[in-house]
Amino acid sequence: MRGKKWHFAVAGVLVALGAAAVVYNGTAAKREAAKNENVETAKAKPALTVTATLPHTVAWPRSLTTNGNIVAWQEVIIGAEIGGLRLMEVLVNVGDKVKRGQLLARIASDSVDADLAQGSAAVAEEEAMLAEAVANADRARQLQATGLISAQQITQSLTAEQTAKARLAAARARVQSTELHLSQTRVLASDHGVISARTATVGSLAQPGQELFRLIRQNRLEWRAEVTAAELPRIRPGQAVMVELADGVTIQGQVRIGAPTVDPQTRIGLVYVDLPAGSPARAGTFARGVFELGEAPALTLPQSAVLLREGFNYVFKLDDKNQVTQTKVAVGRRVEDQVEITGGLEPNTRVVANGVGFLTDGDTVRVVDALAIPQ
């Protein structure tokens, strides 16, 4: 009896387990079916309500933005022409405006004055000796026909006359040289302009060729723009350029000339832009400028249609089922709230116009009130 009871108990347990397994499998199947139904429902439901637009082509101003340095148009080095003498006086400093011929510095001239006085005395002496020699030569010429004077004496008198003339000429030349040295003790401005550097110091010993001052000729500055070889042919002399200085001030310059050559390593050429006189620009500073190159057609979209993600620009194209495809594009010029599309998108391609930051590739959207194409 006990054996039979034990067999009945085991059979009961197995039946219960089987019933539980059936119930569990049915519940799991229902759950999986509900999950699949939810996924299908989520896929069918639009992720976002958006508007759509089409790219359109307009004529936009074409400009070139580049950088460069502001430098002096010409910077003159003013130095000492005489050596071995001390600077006695320096009359100008950095930033002073000067005129052509203005006295900038004075070099000690005492020794030169003494040499000049000595030379002048030598000229007077030679002039007296010449007068005597001329008189003797004239007398010899008069007596030559009479035979009262020998040919040798006549030759000596004429030679003495020529020698006296030569000595006088040499003495006068030495005086002129001394006068030139005296003028070199006065350091003068070679042109109108502004002093950009000064190394002259009172009491220092001047040497020939030593730099004393630097002068920006006519206080004229230029901006040397760095332009790629591809863009260089588009720039013409006389074009207006808006130059933005380091402090944010913008001034208008004018292209003087473009460099005839480019750097073979960087493929960069210089464009020389004249800056207006009296501008706040300073030599040695960095500036940014914009060249206006006329108009060119542009394929444009609203800025709101372009998404910047991970350093790249994207738009979301729409298909017939309003499903979006994320597409990388290249952008160019920007005017107000419009951006130029330079690559990656064909004209007449419908794209999402707003809310692109909330979309991912493959989303389905609901499109309402499609934007009209601007004219």
Image: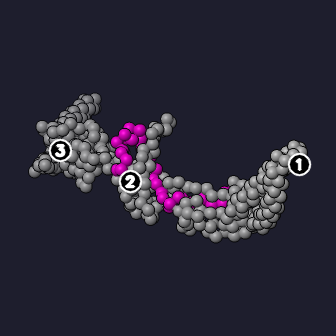
Give the residue at mark 1: 148
Q: Position of residue 81 (x, y in %)?
A: 69, 56
What residue span does the magenta drawing correspond to?
210-239
Residue 212 covered by magenta stretch = yes
**N-terminal of the two: label 3 or label 2?**
3
Q: Could you say which is closer to the camera, residue 37 or residue 108?
A: 108
Observer-nearest of 256 and 10 = 256
The colour scheme used to paint the residues is one colour
Q: Nearer the viewer, residue 114 or 222?
A: 114
Amino acid found under the numbered disc labelled 2: Gln
Where disc 3 sits, the SS reads strand
Residue 134 found in image quarter: bottom right
Residue 331 percent location from the top left of the image: 30, 44
Secondary structure found at label 2: strand
- How far separated are the C-alphas under marks 1 and 3? 118 Å
Q: Residue furthest front?
A: 146
The answer to whether residue 134 is visible is yes
Task: Assess whether mark 2 and mark 3 are in contact (beta carbons under 8 angstroms).
Answer: no
Mark 1 element type: loop
Q: Residue at x 38, y 38 (%)?
A: 230
Q: Amino acid at mark 1?
A: Leu
Q: Which residue is mark 3?
A: 56
Q: Report the residue marked by disc 2.
A: 254
Q: x and y percent of residue 328 in the render? A: 29, 39
Which of the two marks, 1 or 3, is nearer to us in this view? Answer: 1
* Label 1 to label 2: alpha-carbon separation: 86 Å
